[in-house]
Image (spheres, grey):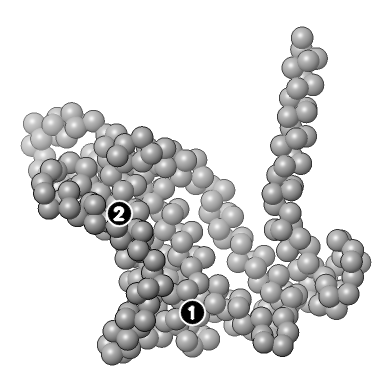
Amino acid sequence: MDKNIRRKKTILFISLTLVSLLVNLPIITMIINSLKSNSEILTSSSFFPQQITFENYQHLHTKTMFWTQMGNSFIVTFFGTLLSILIAAFAGYAISRFRSKFLTGFSRLLLLLQMFPIILALIPLFIMFRNLGLINTHFTVILLYTTLHLPFSIWMYKGYFDAIPTELEDAASIDGCTGLQTFFRIILPISGPGIAAVAIFSFLFSWNEYLIANVFLRDEQLMTIPVGIQLFMQQYGTDWGSLTAAATLTMLPVFIFFLFVQKYFIAGSAAGAVKG
């Protein structure tokens, strides 16, 4: 009996390992190619490098603005995520706890905004920000990222706040807490998974976003990583070595971040999925 169970577990482990390797094959290929020279990438049919080289990473470090653009990505991602967490928390709590025609209309409007493709608004937004002198600033990108995060973040918060018993707030009210004190002292401290889920969603969106950053950040020193990586792809050729090395390094912060907080993301998403 024990042998059968052990055999089934071994088969399951091998099957899952093979599936994981297959699903992540593009990422594995990218990492391996970053350790090849440009000529080997273009001419060799071998999957593994004939000679491991770090010249692509050295080229990124010494000849490009990769680290500056990486810093720009950290700036817009950090502030876009922080503002989304704070603003969406208030809005999500209001929609979850209070009932009025205004809030009902507002919550439905959020769903409509979520379905609106941002590309349709890019030209009017570009003209408006250009007239305000806000092109080529991180402030514009952070503002747009926050605006785009809010509809989905507010609904994630709402789903999580709906799961918190109102009896906790009634008890806090009896003890003399005001509504604002109850929110900060009772609701927010026990909303960790919901806050983490919103933070992860906002972080991933801001870190990977390309279209807005490409339109509003025209100076190479101000570009974020997704736009900067595109510079390795020119009209008449592509620097595949630098491109794969940059993509590998860009992936690392997201991988590390998600590795530590993925359990909160699952918990927060599940809370939002069962309450509407």
- Residue 20 drawn at (x, y percent): 70, 44
**Does residue 235 appear left or right of residue 50 in this picture?**
left
Q: Is residue 63 above or below residue 93?
A: below
Write down the quadrant of residue 175 in the picture.
top left
Residue displayed at 49% across by 65% down: 207
Q: Position of residue 139 (x, y in %)?
A: 35, 77
Residue at the spot of label 2: 111
Q: Nearer the viewer, residue 246 or 12?
A: 12
Label 1 sits on a secondary structure element that is: helix
Question: Given contact means CB atoms under 8 Å apart, are the residues at marks 1 and 2 in contact?
Answer: no
Amino acid type, mark 1: Asn
* Image: 182 above or below 258: above
Alpha carbons under labels 1 and 2: distance apart: 26 Å
Is residue 117 visible to us here? yes
The quarter of the rendered structure image containing the N terminus is top right
Which amino acid is tagged 2? Leu
Q: Quadrant of the C terminus?
A: top left
Q: Residue at coordinates 10% horizontally, 43% vertically from top-left?
A: 178
Residues packed near mark 2 inside 10 Å, few (<14), some (14 to 19) or many (20 plus): few
Q: Residues within 10 Å of mark 1 (few under 14, many from 20)?
A: some
- Exactly how many numbered labels are in the figure? 2
Quarter occupied by residue 39 = bottom right
Left or right relative to 223: residue 87: left
Question: Label 1, on which residue?
Answer: 214
Residue ID at (90%, 63%) = 46
With respect to residue 80, does 212 lie above or below?
below
In this rendering, position of residue 224 left or right of residue 116: right
**Along the viewing direction, whichever of 3 and 69 lies nearer the viewer:** 3
